[in-house]
């Protein structure tokens, strides 16, 4: 009885630790995933999740254009269907468009068929709108566990996570968002921001981040451009 309790306790804590690891951005069971890119060059990637979402995505396109910067937008299938014109603007302005699932559910405790369909439906939508390059994926909420990495590995799809997360979705002050990013970037950093939801301060924060990091010598690239260098 005593040994049984010890075995149960060990199993419980092992599961707990593994579960914790699987939910962080720092670990994935199999397949290719990136939280940042290994490089000594002063390059970073801005990424925006949960769009397309007018008018914020358009505002970002305008600001990024003024700054001469290309970014990566991880888009949700349902939003692509609702805002086709915004995706077309992103394509026309040569930003990279990634896949952030079809319906933005946590892809854990889901069947392999469901997980695969969440990825394939969004890829298909983007391809039908003219996206030709390899479409990178980002797990909703960064949650991975077992099934998603298994399916991504089967599909030979890269999971792009992040190394800098200023939690812009709950911060109203653009200076606070920007100073978190500026003090945490390193060469090859992937910066997580959002154009989905109500990103009131993200557009203004983007301008501060880009101007400040450019004075420090940083260049901005899409995630694919950074991946091609490593
Ligand atoms: Zn998301």
Image: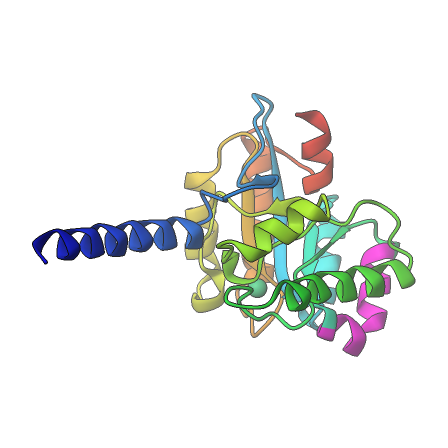
Picture coordinates of residue 105 (x, y %)?
57, 71
| Image-quarter location of ligand 1 | bottom right
Res. 32 image quadrant: top right
For the residue pair 217 and 167, the one nearer the viewer reads as: 167
Q: Quarter holding the N terminus?
A: bottom left
For the residue pair 4 and 132, the one nearer the viewer reads as: 4
Q: Which residue reaches farthest left? A: 2
Q: Is residue 133 left or right of residue 185?
A: right
Picture coordinates of residue 64 (x, y %)?
71, 51
Is residue 54 visible in the rendered image? The answer is: no
For the residue pair 92 and 147, the one nearer the viewer reads as: 147
Queried whether the magenta region covers residue 84, the answer comes back as: yes
Residue segment shown in magenta: 78-91
The residue located at (63%, 66%) in the rendering is 50
Q: Quarter holding the C terminus?
A: top right
Queried whether the magenta region covers residue 139, the answer comes back as: no
What is the chief secondary structure element of the magenta stretch?
helix
Q: Which residue reaches farthest top? A: 40
In the image, residue 97 sits, relative to residue 172, either above or below, namely above
The residue located at (65%, 45%) in the rendering is 153
Picture coordinates of residue 98 (x, y %)?
72, 54
Q: Is residue 108 left or right of residue 41?
A: left
In the image, residue 229 sits, relative to residue 202, either above or below, namely above
**Colour convention:** rainbow
Picture coordinates of residue 174 (x, y %)?
48, 59
The residue located at (21%, 56%) in the rendering is 8
Is residue 29 visible in the rendered image? The answer is: yes
The residue located at (67%, 52%) in the rendering is 137
């Amino acid at each position: 009885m005593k040994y049984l309790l010890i075995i149960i306790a060990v199993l419980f804590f092992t599961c707990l630790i593994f579960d914790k690891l699987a939910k962080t951005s720092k670990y994935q069971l199999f397949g290719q995933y990136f939280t940042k890119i290994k490089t000594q060059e002063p390059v970073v990637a801005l990424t925006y999740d949960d769009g397309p979402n007018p008018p914020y995505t358009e505002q970002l396109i305008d600001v990024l254009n003024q700054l001469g910067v290309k970014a990566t937008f991880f888009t949700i299938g349902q939003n692509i269907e609702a805002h086709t014109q915004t995706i077309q603007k992103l394509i026309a302005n040569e930003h990279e468009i990634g896949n952030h699932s079809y319906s933005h559910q946590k892809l854990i405790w889901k069947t392999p068929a469901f997980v695969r369909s969440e990825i394939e439906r969004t890829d298909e939508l983007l391809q039908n709108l003219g996206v030709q390059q390899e479409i990178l994926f980002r797990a909703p909420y960064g949650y991975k566990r077992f099934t998603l990495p298994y399916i991504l590995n089967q599909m030979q799809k890269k999971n792009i996570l992040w190394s800098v997360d200023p939690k812009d979705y709950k911060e109203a002050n653009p200076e606070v968002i920007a100073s978190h990013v500026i003090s945490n970037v390193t060469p090859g950093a992937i910066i997580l921001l959002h154009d989905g939801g109500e990103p009131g301060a993200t557009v203004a924060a983007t301008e501060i981040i880009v101007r400040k990091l450019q004075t420090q010598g940083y260049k901005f690239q899409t995630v694919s451009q950074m991946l091609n260098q490593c």
